[in-house]
Amino acid sequence: MPVESVYPELEPLLPRVRKPIQYVGGEVGSVVKDWDSADVRWALCYPDAYEVGLPNQGVQILYEVLNERDGVLAERTYTVWPDLEALMREHGVPQFTVDAHRPVGAFDVLGVSFATEMAYTNLLTVLDLAGLPLFSSERAGHHPLVIAGGHAAFNPEPVADFLDAVVLGDGEQAVLAITDVIRDWKRAGRPGGRDGLLLKLSTIAYVPRFYDVEYHPDGKISKVTPNLPGVSPTVSKHTVMDLDAWPYPRQPIVPVAETVHERYSVELFRGCTRGCRFCQAGMITRPVRERSITTIGSMVAKGVKASGFNEVGLLSLSSADHSEINEIAVDLADCYEGTNVGLSLPSTRVDAFNVTLANELSRNGRRSGLTFAPEGGSERMRKVINKMVTEQDLIRTVTTAYASGWRQVKLYFMCGLPTETDEDVLAVAQLARKVIEAGRESSGRRDIRCTVSIGGFVPKPHTPFQWAAQCAPEVVDDRLRALGGALRADRGYGKAIGYRYHDGRPALIEGLLSRGDRRVGGVILAAWRDGARFDGWSEHFSFERWQRCAETALAREPVDLAWYTTRERDYSEVLPWDHLDAGLDRDWLWQDWQDSIAPEGAGEVEDCRWTPCYECGVCPALGTEIQVGPTGERLDGRRLLPVVGGR
């Protein structure tokens, strides 16, 4: 039967909330399909505000992949702000999609994309407003399956009790496989009910209810074992091996309200093997798989034409590492010269930026911000984290940028890294002053600025630092205050250097959620019931709330907040995510952790794109391989790209 829109009930509430336009839908690129013609219906959720969620590349890709299929329907939903949440509860309006304003509870699947653990409480808001039981064990056959994915789902144990299934890794092929299973199950008369469907899906996704967790008396995990025959003891991630075969999004969604990014983004490659020891994204997305220059050119042409965006973001974990990045930048700049379309490279390694990129990215006279991430202030610290960037690399890079017309660069660092000292953090101030000096000298100007942005380090699963003790927030805060004083101390540079930082307390809660086990679910639930919403937003985050709820929820357990965060793990400890396989060899990760903290100094792990394999384990474990160019091909602007922007 058709599912009616809730918009008639929603519309009278919108004049009473902030930014009502974000809830009305109707964006260019959005899709509304007939409900009755669909066999399987997905509600894709990014559990944060519209302004953050709409540009999310992963959701946009899955939205398009699903809607291209006959008999499949996908719509989007985001977490509503607390002002609308209160009104929806008062007037009985359920969680809705922005495409057709259909109630989320009517769909077959609620697919949730977690980019950050700090969105876990927002999931509970979405579930509750949708009328779904918070616990998967309490849901009936008519409730949608709640399936999570995204980088922050590689350790889903803290929210395991709220999820029906979890997809690890790339989602393009996985969502289609899940769709086929659901369609066949429905056509067969729903054999086995909800558990029967989940058992079929357990070959594709991780189903937490099919695994039991046992604990030692001291609180550590004893073992994680399947509780049904036929369920695998480990679950492996999905890897799309031919990105050229998946050139999405083709029809990017154009926001109707202001969002954090308003550009057409094309993913140059997926994965990173630079080996930064702190970087979960680089570890879990291996191996590197490049898109060809011709596919990139075609995607840009079609995406700009379909959306009207005047900025093209060339995205990857380290975009300048593409084997043909110079050719891509030159050819795209040639194609769009004289138009209003500009290129940006939001993710740029210090040692990969060069004069060619600087010139091409500013060809149309537009200079979007340049951000470089040395991560560690001292050379010693950068060796510990395997961020093999020297001070000379940084000075050479910023000199190129300033000489090419940029007046401001942003430098990102972390505080609280393993083995870090006060001196390592204070070295950031010395580095920033040298950057200003280099900029003034290379440009001949005094209006040169450098912004230092620094955040607290959080150890992440599936990285060499997964065993590390997190730095106490008071130590992080003391170092950040000292750094601020050092940056302001020299009047010749103080006004030229901006300083932005995040205090250590939110990072501690992120650490709890990142490396927690199923017992942390009680903390999340307690915090949500106590009003936790939008914890990734500083104006909504309350450390005191989380601290109080952790004490209450864990009162009868032999563990506490510090046990999950500031405690170092040893090799023998079973980690909550050990049964979830990102392809990385555990012994290799452990050895890299030991190498990073070795008394004689950290050893370098080189990038296996350009050096022999160093046996991280991904390729043999998953049957994958690195896919890089160069292809030797070039873009023909006259043939390939449409005339846009009033050439």
Image (cartoon, rainbow, N blue to C red):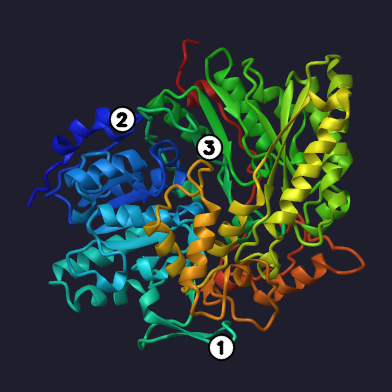
Q: Which of 219 and 586 is in front in this view?
A: 219
- Closer to viewer: mark 3 or mark 2: 2
* Residue located farthest toward the right when viewing the structure as drawn: 600
Judging from the image, what secondary structure is the residue with disc 3 in?
helix
Q: In this view, does 543 lie above or below 491?
A: below
Which residue, given by chain and number where applicable, does mark 2 sit on? 20
Judging from the image, what secondary structure is the residue with disc 1 in?
loop
Report the amino acid beneath label 3: Ile
Mark 1 and mark 2: span between their CA atoms?
A: 51 Å
Report the amino acid beneath label 2: Pro
Q: Residue 216 carries which label?
A: 1
**3 or 2: tag closer to the N-terminus:** 2
**3 or 1: tag closer to the N-terminus:** 1
**Drawn side of residue 532 relative to residue 275, left or right:** left
Mark 3 and mark 1: span between their CA atoms?
A: 52 Å
Q: In this view, does 296 lie above or below 285?
A: above
The answer to whether one can see residue 241 in this image is no
The answer to whether one can see residue 324 in this image is yes
* Residue located farthest toward the left when viewing the structure as drawn: 1
Report the amino acid beneath label 1: His
Image point 35% across, 62% down: which residue? 147
**Drawn side of residue 484 relative to residue 210, left or right:** right
**Drawn side of residue 49 relative to residue 497, left or right:** left
Image point 50% across, 53% down: which residue? 118
Residue 571 rendering spot, x and y as whole percentages? 70, 80
Residue 520 rendering spot, x and y as whole percentages? 48, 69
**CB of mark 1 within 8 Å of CB of mark 2?**
no
Q: In which quarter of the image is residue 391?
A: top right
Q: Quadrant of residue 458?
A: bottom right
Which residue, given by chain and number where applicable, does mark 3 sit on? 296
